[in-house]
């Protein structure tokens, strides 16, 4: 296995990571993506004070992320064409792919109707997943981006609480937001 294999297996995870609390899709408690340490590409999804999910990137030049909930996890690969692929690692997880567009994208999930991803706002940016036909919002994250930390508040509509892939939708929506913010900062710097 060697150095490379051990680095990928433990990508971005601290040695003393606390166990994740079970995610309750019916809970109406406030959810928030937090970045515990400045400059570290690692985020936690908090429900109140409980950590229900983790998202981590191996390092500054690693474009792949690991998304973990208590009962399922995915490896999210950022492809050369801008698309994101979520490959199941554990649990009853299903794969998904986000196909990037110019202003919007499409989240394709196995056994579920496709969703559109879009962003909006100017001073208060948000990213959301909506149904394609009715354009009904399901999951929205409002990002707070600072110099060394990026965090976000999560809104879930009642229609999304009834979906069996809510965990994947929450994680992929945050990854989409992070990738978009990263690309915008690279464009601004050039």
Image (tube, grey):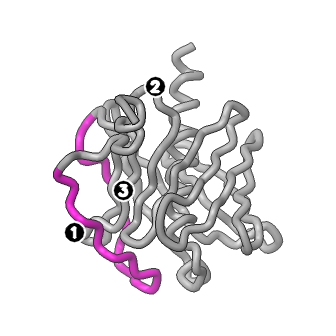
Residue depth check, mark 1 versus mark 2: number of the one nearer the observer: 2
In this rendering, position of residue 1 left or right of residue 181: left
**Residue 23 is inside the magenta segment:** yes
Assign a secondary structure to mark 3: strand
Which residue is identified by label 1? Answer: 49
Residue 117 among magenta residues: no
Left or right relative to 51: residue 135: right
- Residue 50 lies, with reference to residue 43, above or below; the image says below
Which residue in the structure is indicated by mark 2?
61
Secondary structure of the residue carrying numbered label 1: loop
Q: Which residues are magenta?
A: 16-38
For image coordinates 51% across by 57% down, the residue present is 74
Residue 54 numbered tag: 3
Q: Mark 1 or mark 2: which comes first in sequence?
A: 1
Q: Quadrant of residue 137?
A: bottom right
The spot of residue 160 in percent (x, y) is: 58, 78
| Image coords of residue 140 (percent x, y) | 54, 62
Query: Going 35% across and 72% down the picture, which residue do you hit?
Result: 30
């Amino acid at each position: 296995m060697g150095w490379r294999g051990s680095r990928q297996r433990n990508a971005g995870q601290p040695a003393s990571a606390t166990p994740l609390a079970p995610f309750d899709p019916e809970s109406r408690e406030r959810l928030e993506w937090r970045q515990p340490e400045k400059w570290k590409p690692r985020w936690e999804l908090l429900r109140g004070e409980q950590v229900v999910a983790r998202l981590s990137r191996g390092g500054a030049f690693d474009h792949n992320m690991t998304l973990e909930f208590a009962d399922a996890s995915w490896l999210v690969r950022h492809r050369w064409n801008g698309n994101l692929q979520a490959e199941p690692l554990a649990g009853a997880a299903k794969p998904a792919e986000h196909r990037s567009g110019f202003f919007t994208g499409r989240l394709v999930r196995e056994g579920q109707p496709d969703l559109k991803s879009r962003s909006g706002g100017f001073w208060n940016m948000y990213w959301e997943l909506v149904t394609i036909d009715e354009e009904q919002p399901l999951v929205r994250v409002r990002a707070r981006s600072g110099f060394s930390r990026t965090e976000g508040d999560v809104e879930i509509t009642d229609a999304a609480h009834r979906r069996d892939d809510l965990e994947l939708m929450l994680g992929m929506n945050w990854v989409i937001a992070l990738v978009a913010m990263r690309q915008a900062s690279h464009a601004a710097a050039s």
